[in-house]
Image (cartoon, rainbow, N blue to C red):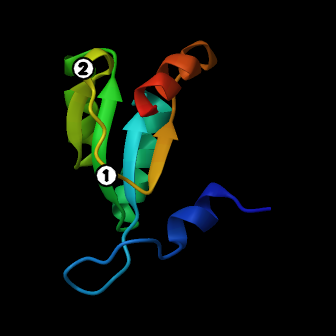
Amino acid sequence: MTGISDVMSRRAIGVDRTGESRLKISIIGAGRVGQTLGFMAKQAGFEITDVVTRSLKSARAAVRFIGAGKAQTADGAYLSPVDLILIATPDSQIEAAVALIQ
């Protein structure tokens, strides 16, 4: 079985200036779990593109914590083209998060 640490440590799609592979990730739901996974992904060398939460204040706080990303609110979100969308919302909000992707 593949764990999150296995995924975080692999080279992925896309190539940056150095020729290294970089996975592009958007995060929907940046509470404690979303922020921590975003921070870990950034530290592993992946590119965090969008950070989407219900309020702009919390999205900005998450971007500061992660160290990357564009803060957006769920009601006005436009996700950049990415390789992976991390949904880290409460179960009751997953359907709304999926609607942002479609």
State left or right for residue 92 relative to residue 48: right
- Please provide percent x and percent y for residue 92: 60, 12
Q: Is residue 72 above or below residue 79?
A: above
- Please provide percent x and percent y for residue 4: 61, 56
Amino acid carrying mark 2 in the image: Gly
The residue labelled by disc 1 is 48
* Location of residue 1 by image quarter: bottom right
Q: Is residue 81 above or below residue 31?
A: below
Q: Residue furthest right?
A: 1
Residue located 22% across and 49% down the image: 68
Which mark, residue 62? none
Report crowding for label 1: few under 14, some 14 to 19, many 20 or more residues within 10 A (C-alpha). many
- Please provide percent x and percent y for residue 47: 31, 59
The residue labelled by disc 2 is 76
Amino acid carrying mark 1 in the image: Ile
C-alpha distance separating marks 2 and 1: 18 Å
- Please provide percent x and percent y for residue 62: 29, 34
Q: Is residue 75 above or below residue 51?
A: above
Residue located 33% across and 83% down the image: 20
